[in-house]
Image (cartoon, rainbow, N blue to C red):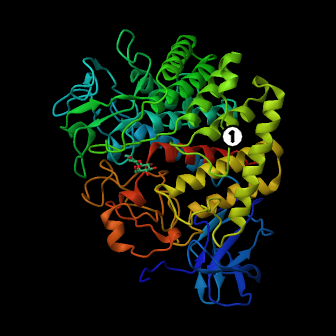
Amino acid sequence: GGHDYGSPVRVNQVGYLPSGPKQASIVDAAAKPLSWQLRDADGRTVASGRTRVQGDDAMSGDHVHIADFSSFRRSGHGYTLAVGSAVSYPFDIEANLYDSLRRDSLEYFYYNRSGIPIDAQYVGAAYARPAGHIGVAPNKGDTSVPCLPGTCDYSLDVAGGWYDAGDQGKYVVNGGLAAWQLMDLYERSWGRPGDGLLAIPENHNGIPDVLDESRWEMEFLLSMQVPAGQPLAGMAHHKIHDLAWTSLPTMPQNDPQPRYLHPPSTAATLNLAAAGAQCARVWALWDKAFSQRCLAAAHGAWQAALQHPAIYAPAEDSVGGGAYDDTDVSDEFSWAAAELYATTGDRTYLDHITADITSAGFSWRDTGALADLTIVRLPWRFPPARVAAARARVLKVADGYVKDLKSQGYPNPYRPADGQYVWGSNSATTNNALIIATAYDLTGRPGYRDAVLESMDYLLGRNAVNQSYITGYGERASHNEHNRIFAHELDPKLPEPPAGSMAGGPNSGLDDPVAQQNLPGCRPAKCYLDEIDSYSTNEVAINWNSSLAWLAGFVDSLRP
Ligand code: 9MR
């Protein structure tokens, strides 16, 4: 209670596709349908109707009505939806609605690159900054990083990659997933639209920009592999980050902390194997030498993981960086085997593909579903019986998500069985929507497409807090994500997060003091604060934006 969420009429604050579903969610206690009016920018009523009573929404506690104006298809700007005296934020109806989001959500990665100056030519003066962590004082630098004292006696050059999130650590498990999602976006679109899409330094090198961007991370992942001749050769170090948490704001080039390689883990190693195998596949056409480097690293990682199948990153190792701990790596084995099989056709990997996609979806910790997604992405590379089974499973899981979405007052394909929203719940929304989108690619059934578009509605304002979780998109969008670089809320001289970044979203765990103080007793879908210090509800992360970028690419590709 006590929070003012503004208008009870909740819409996608960016808008709707002319040919897509167009619904609003309205918070109203009325037990009977209400009348609604769709108005154009001049205030003229262009359509009207009555709501459907959806009822009490479990995740928000709101009593919700739904207005459906899908049959209205006229493009335009500045529409509003009115119910009684309440009026929504304005929105557009446009075929190219998602054109800029697909680019902004990918350019997010350039803004977060480590080890390279961020050039005003691409990002504008406000976002330009010197290279971070290349060994120029006060940085200790990522060009020669030792292991945590007593854990090894070599140093590695692990400069480059993307900063994880609001912190400037670099982690192999979610880095592998993020790189995978960008490469999967490439594989889905067969390289279209290719070079020149993004404002990044490589945008005129004749190679699709999404591959260039994913390579920035892939090179870092490769550098995290334990060198030959060392104990645990072939394994991947779990992560590299500061010894202690730095304060906000801290620009990367000003970070004075010593940084260490943390010990290898089986999970990180299998992430490297999976992303490396996919890298070998997608780069075969563009850069043979790099493709071969990726494949060699993937092979080495796979062998090392077989030899050391149970080395886990400790949950307690969370000072100066996140733990990213995971003590079940059967799903990582399965995913890596699927990628290696898809790339090499070597039958020895087939027996290791053991994890099925389930309604639990996927995350940096649970990667089993990715095996099925790769099988249906590349059906000609897998035995037909495997493809048929994977396809049936993907459709079944997608059907469940569509049902979950439709069962709620706000259209979220994420409806956790335990009734709690996780840290980064918006990435569960986008990852589940990605699975529904895959079902659409497999079948062309409009119901899947509509559910993906409605998932975008949820992210862009048709939700319990009337909030667009994507910076720069929508009238009431997140501005204050937890971030050391774009810390405008703390220092007005610094910029806000650039457009196209996704906040983690409601988290009923309330895992930070600011959330605990301000959100006691919140219903899961309302446990969100647009405050820079609420890292457990309002952080960004590479594996969340990679999912958003995938999805934005998908919805943009629905353009006629
Ligand atoms: O995304 C991670 C989430 O699943 C975990 O519950 C959470 C706590 O361990 O950590 C999240 O990842 C954070 C990482 O540990 C450190 N960098 C910022 C990440 C996003 O908040």
Q: Residue at x 43, y 63 (%)?
A: 509
Q: Residue at x 59, y 52 (%)?
A: 430
> Can residue 94 be seen in this snapshot?
no
Residue 136 x, y percent position in the rendering: 20, 28
Q: Residue at x 37, y 60 (%)?
A: 511
Element under disc 1: loop
Mark 1 highlights which residue? 356
Q: Residues within 10 Å of mark 1 (few under 14, many from 20)?
A: many
283 vs 307, nearest the viewer: 307
46 vs 530, nearest the viewer: 530
> Taking 442 as reference, is 100 left or right?
left
> Can residue 317 be seen in this snapshot?
yes
Q: Residue at x 80, y 43 (%)?
A: 392
Residue type beneath disc 1: Asp
Q: Is mark 1 within 8 Å of ligand 1?
A: no
Quadrant for residue 492, please give it: bottom left
227 vs 28, nearest the viewer: 227
Q: Is residue 473 above or below residue 23?
A: above
> Taking 32 as reference, is 131 left or right?
left
Q: Is residue 333 above or below residue 246?
A: above
